[in-house]
Image: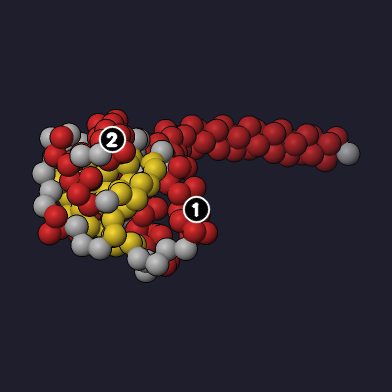
Amino acid sequence: MREEKKLLLEEIKEKIDSSSSLVVTKFKNITSTESWNFRNILLKNASEMEVVKKRVFLKAFEKSGYKCSIEELDGQIAVIFIKDDPVGAIKAIFEFSEQTNKLEVIRGEIEDKVYNKEDLLFLSKLPTMNDLRAEFLSVLEAPMSGTLSVMESLLTSVIYALEEKKKLEEKNKG
């Protein structure tokens, strides 16, 4: 194997090993602008896309302890390496795929478990970790805001009662 391919193989293997998850995709006719925009979206989701040759990817994949056959990898492939929450990146992948029809998900590896396209599509419908955190905070906040509303209405009713009493006293004096 040539020195360049060995370096590329090691680079891909390092990316596989350092990623918590990865998604293998097939692409066709993606313009440089679309690719650039998609890569920026992936960066926001702690992910990166790498276009790789199938044989180099398969060798790096196997060296990292995963299994995949070349028959699964049809066409030109791009691998999305996910460092953090996989749901956000998977959402972005499927959104881009639906918008452009130029990217097709083949399979994914999330925390050492293999997922097919349908499983990943299901995961893309789930809320991201940030969405779940926001929902949790709103659940914690709801009782506090309810308590504040009750306190505010009590204070308002006391003030209203005092004003009415003052009006009655003035009326009785006059």
Q: Name the residue under label 2.
A: 3
Viewport quadrant of the C terminus: top right
Residue 36 screen position, x and y as percent: 50, 53
How many discs mark residues in the rendered view? 2
Mark 2 crowd level (few <14, some 14–19, many ≥20, 10 Å Cα):
few
Left or right relative to 138: residue 166: right
Secondary element at tag 2: helix
For residue 2, above or below residue 30: above
Left or right relative to 167: residue 140: left
Amino acid type indicated by mark 2: Glu
Q: Which of the two discs, 1 and 2, labels the residue nearer the N terminus? A: 2
Secondary element at tag 1: helix
Q: Mark 1 points at which residue?
A: 36
Return the mark for residue 94: none
How is the protein colored in the picture? Answer: secondary structure
Residue 159 image-quadrant placement: top right
For residue 19, above or below residue 49: above
